[in-house]
Image (tube, rainbow, N blue to C red):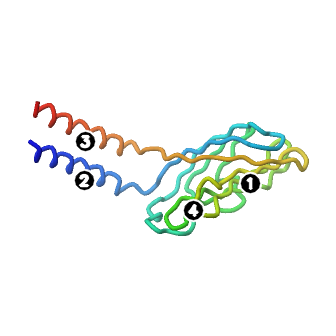
Amino acid sequence: MKKTLTLATLACLVLLQAGTAHAATSLFDLAGSTDSGPLAGQRFSGSFAYDSSAAVAGFTGNIALTSFSLQFAGQTYTLANADAVPAVFYDGGVFLGLDYVDADSADAALRPQLSLVSGFTAFAGEAYLSYTGAGAAGGFGSYSVTAVPEPQTLALLLAGLGLLAAVVRRRA
């Protein structure tokens, strides 16, 4: 019976790996709040995606975003608003954060000029948000990024757990 359980576990791992091998675009949520300036305490959130197949072990460089949306100070920022190509940055395979700039707002009092800046060393906690609001006043904030699980990965994981439960139940 121990051999059956080991084979079932191996089968689940193979199924899970096969399901994630085809996934190239990864979706992430980001959330944070401002720490300083006239909008101190302002919460913001959004999501972004990029082709993560390039981010192999040891990768250093940037990967362009394929989608981006951020809600900040009552405004929505998207890929179309970006002044340059938004990207995520890696150093030695470690995710440092993302770079996004929207600094061409006609009226910064109504639509704050916004920058998301990645970290500089192998520590994603250095990533930050910078904004310029009414007049020359501006401030900073911090953000965190979490991966959004793909539906097929969750389905395969549940199928594997179901298979393991069936094997254990059969054993009992």
Q: CA distance from mark 1 to mark 2?
A: 43 Å
Residue at x 30%, y 43% (from the top left corner): 156
Foreground tag (4 vs 3) = 4
* Picture quadrant of residue 47: top right
Between discs 4 and 2, the one toward the N terminus: 2
Task: Assess whether mark 4 and mark 1 are in contact (beta carbons under 8 angstroms).
Answer: no
**How many numbered dots are placed on residues in this image?**
4
Residue wearing tag 1: 102
Quarter of the picture containing the N terminus is top left
Distance from disc 2 to disc 3, alpha carbons, whole Å, reads 10 Å
Residue underneath mark 4: 122
* Structural crowding at the residue carrying mark 3, measured as other residues with C-alpha within 10 Å and reported as few (<14), some (14–19) or many (≥20): many
Precedes in sequence: disc 1 or disc 4? 1
- Left or right of residue 23, residue 48 in this image: right
Q: Is residue 67 left or right of residue 167?
A: right
Q: How much space separates mark 4 and mark 2, taking CA atoms?
A: 31 Å
Q: Where residue 154 appears, x then y in whole percent?
A: 36, 41
Counting residues from the start of the chain, the first of labels 1 and 2 encountered is 2
